[in-house]
Amino acid sequence: MFLRGSKKTKAEVYLNEPIGKDKDDNEITLLEILENDERSIEDEIDLKLKTKVLYKKMEDVLKDREKEIIILRFGLNGDKPKTQNEIAKLMGISRSYVSRIETKAIHKLSKEFEE
């Protein structure tokens, strides 16, 4: 019995047990190798739900121009976020006007989320 039990114990691996060393001679554990830097499935679902709520509130609360500026400014259409100057050139308005519209739109959305 003892031999069978010790044989079984030898096959066990613990996550925090050192399994080797890296190039800087620091010990590496199995946990460090298996660690996942990506978001968990719960975080992914939470993000998707919050994104849906954001788009719904944008649709309900913002005017078309405000919505367009927020989408361009933060890259919500999948593109790279644009600067206020880039948006101003695209829309044929001044950068300061883009800034005012953006501020107003963010304020409207903030009020909606506080309720």
Image: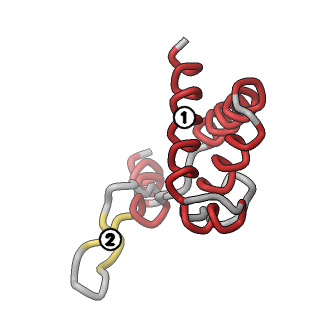
In the rendered image, the quadrant that contains the C terminus is top right
List the single residue furthest toward the left: 25
Is residue 99 placed above or below 59 in the rendered structure? below
Left/right placement of residue 22 relative to residue 59 reads left
Q: Nearer the viewer, residue 21 or 61?
A: 61
| Amino acid found under the numbered disc labelled 1 | Lys
Measuring from the top left, give residue 29's x and y in whole percent.
Answer: 35, 65
Q: Nearer the viewer, residue 6 or 2?
A: 6
Q: Residues within 10 Å of mark 2 (few under 14, many from 20)?
A: some
- Say which residue appears at 43% left-offset and 57% top-offset: 13
Residue 48 lies in what quarter of the image?
A: top right
- Say which residue appears at 49% left-offset and 58% top-offset: 37
Cβ–Cβ below 8 Å for labels 1 and 2? no
For label 2, the residue is 28
In the rendered image, the quadrant that contains the N terminus is top left
- Using the numbered discs, state the Cα–Cα distance from disc 1 to disc 2 in whole angstroms: 51 Å
- Say which residue appears at 64% left-offset and 62% top-offset: 87
For label 1, the residue is 104
Label of residue 46 in the image: none
| Amino acid found under the numbered disc labelled 2 | Ile
Left/right placement of residue 77 relative to residue 109 reads right
Measuring from the top left, give residue 50's x and y in whole percent.
Answer: 64, 32
Q: Give whichever of discs 1 and 2 has the lower sequence position.
A: 2
